[in-house]
Amino acid sequence: MSIDFSCKSFGKWILAGEHSVLRGVPALVFPIQSRNLELNYSKGSQSLELQLVGDHGKDLQLLVWGVLEKACELKKISRADLKGTLLLESSIPVGAGMGASAALCVAVTRWLGFLGYVDESEYYEFARNLENLFHGESSGVDIAVALSGEGLRFVRNGEKKSLTATWRPHWYISYSGKRGVTVDAVNKVKDLILKNPDLGEKLDLQMAKAVEIAERALTLTSQEGLPVLAEAIELAGQCFEQWGLNDGEPRAHIEWLRKNGALAVKPTGSGGGGYVLSLWRNEPPVEILEKLIPC
């Protein structure tokens, strides 16, 4: 088909700041260039036709129409007004904490911008409102990195700063073996805070400390920065443990990574399943490496 509009948005992984970002703690987030969603649009007179391809394109079947309905509701337009063909190709797994819903919301927002329904100045807030469909309350961190395509220090008040490392850590993500449900993990943390506000505040402060240490680690040399970065990842990982988000397969996967030589390990994203971040002194052995995705 002839392409009238095309855009690409990326999956993401979070170094530190998960959950606490909802309460004002910064989060350090990076795109995964190898996991992305590409939207191609061809104008036409027929009712909107949707084509889904790629490793995880079909996973979007139910999500896309929900996002489009929400977008039409927000902009007070009829879905019947949307014509032509949308082709979505995705390599981002759904329900894995890799930002599939944010990538979709950003792609749809940009497409509606092309059609003239959304101003570019609205993109972030509009896409974040779309993502509330999935998370109940989107912090906006996934949306921010899907829009920018670069590493960010993100604060929920809208503050965003580019984030780059002065050295290249050997860090990877890998699937824990269990699907993560973001809204369930968010609610679990909120319940803990309601029942034990002192512990909730302590864990938010601990996550904030992990963010601060990780950010500093990235400004050092590789030799100086590696142990500091490992400390930050472990500190953030302990928050997930105390939030109760490591049970079952995630804990087993974390132990497997440690047993095979990972210096530090933590969930990345909401936890309760999905992907796990691991930091290594050197490149992992080949038999381990084939199960990891470079960050």
Image (tube, grey):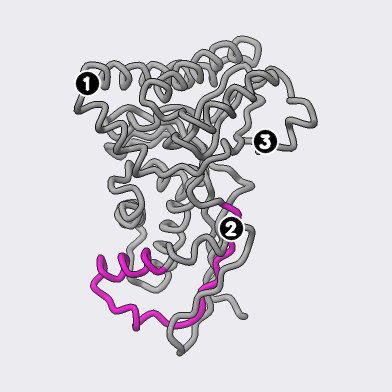
Q: Few, some or many C-alpha atoms within 10 Å of disc 2 (few <14, some 14-19, many ≥20)?
A: some
The single residue placed furthest to the bottom in the displayed view is 45
Vertical placement of 50 versus 181: above or below? Answer: below
Q: Amino acid at mark 3?
A: Leu
The single residue placed furthest to the front in the displayed view is 248
Q: Which residues are magenta?
A: 65-92
- Residue 202: image quadrant is top left
Query: In this rendering, would 175 be left or right of 214?
Result: right
- Residue 227: image quadrant is top right
- Residue 220: image quadrant is top right
Task: Identify the disc placed on residue 292.
Answer: 3
Q: Is residue 58 magenta?
A: no
On the image, the x and y values in percent for residue 187 come to 29, 38
Residue that appears at 33% across and 32% down: 21
Do labels 1 and 3 touch, CB within 8 Å? no
For label 1, the residue is: 196
User: Closest to the observer: 199 or 36?
Assistant: 199
| Total tally of numbered discs in the picture | 3
Q: Few, some or many C-alpha atoms within 10 Å of disc 3 (few <14, some 14-19, many ≥20)?
A: some
Task: State the separation of the CA atoms marked 2 and 3.
Answer: 18 Å
On the image, the x and y values in percent for residue 45 come to 45, 89
Instruction: Select label 1 or label 3 by which is in front.
Output: 1
Task: Identify the disc placed on residue 56.
Answer: 2
Query: In this orientation, does residue 121 appear?
Result: no
